[in-house]
Amino acid sequence: MQKKFTLFAVFLFFSIISLAQFQKGSVTASFNIGDIRYVNLENKNLQKDNYLSFNPGIGYFIKNNWEIGVGVNFSSLHLRDSAHGGYYQNSRTFGAFAYTNYYLGKRKLKPYLTFQTGLNYTAGRYIYNADPLTHFRIRDFYYGIGGGLNWNISSRFSVFTEATYRNEYPFDPNGGGRLNLTIGARFFFNKKKK
C-alpha cells in the first residue's frame, strides 16, 4: 500500500510541475518535422518521393493555456515519377509563419487547438514527359486550422503531434487545401517568480 501511495505522490508532484509550464509568461521553443506522410516513399508508381520540412519556432503564453508564436520553415521536395508519363520536380521552400495554440485539460497529455498563417516562397524546376525543363518561383499565403496532442515528459520538455488542414492559395480560385501532419518537440522556459 505504501508503494502505491508513494507512486501516486510522485505522479501528482510531476503533474503539478508540468502544469506550471502552461502559465502566463512562459516562453517556448519548438521544432517540428512535417508533413510526415511524405517523408520518404518508394513504390512501383512513385520511384522516388522525398519531402522534408523543418519548422523551428518560439512562443509565449499570453494567458494560462494560450500560446502565440512565430517561426520559420524550410522544405525540400525531390520527386521522380516515371509511371505516369514521366515527371520530375526538385524544389525548395522558405517561409515565415505565426501561430496560436489553446491547450485543453490539466493533465500531462494535453490536447490543443491551433490556428496558423504564413507566407512561403518556393523556387524549383520540373520536367513533364518530354517537355523542356521549366523553372518556377511561387509566393503563397496560407492558413491552417487543426488540433494536436502535447505530452509533457518533464517540466521543461514535451513532444507533440499535430494535424492541420492547410488552405493554400486562399485568394486563388484554383487554390486548394491539404492535410498536414507533423511531429515535434517543445522546450519550456518558465517565467521567474518574484
Image (cartoon, rainbow, N blue to C red):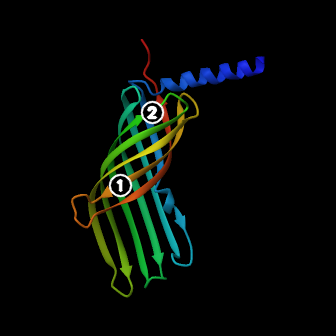
Q: Quadrant of the C terminus?
A: top left
Q: Nearer the viewer, residue 101 or 34?
A: 101
Amino acid tagged 1:
Arg
Q: Could you tell me which residue is drawn at 43 percent across and 62 percent down?
A: 76
Three-letter amino acid code of the residue under disc 2: Leu
State the residue position of label 2.
104
Q: Position of residue 84 (x, y in %)?
A: 45, 82
Judge left or right: residue 192 versus residue 168.
Answer: right
Q: Residue at x 43, y 55 (%)?
A: 180
Q: Quadrant of the N terminus?
A: top right
Label 1 environment density (alpha carbons within 10 Å; few <14, some 14–19, many ≥20): many
Decide: is 113 above or below 75.
above
The x, y position of residue 80, in whole percent, is 47, 76
Whole-percent x and y of residue 122? 32, 62
Q: Is residue 102 above or below residue 81?
A: above
Is 19 situated above or below 83? Answer: above
Q: Which mark is residue 2?
A: none
| Mark 2, other Cα within 10 Å: few <14 / some 14–19 / many ≥20 | some
* Mark 2 vs mark 1, CA separation in Å: 22 Å
Q: What residue lies at 38% left-to-right and 24% top-to-bottom?
A: 25
The residue under label 1 is 166
- N-terminal of the two: label 2 or label 1? 2
Q: Horizontal placement of 131 versus 110: left or right? A: left
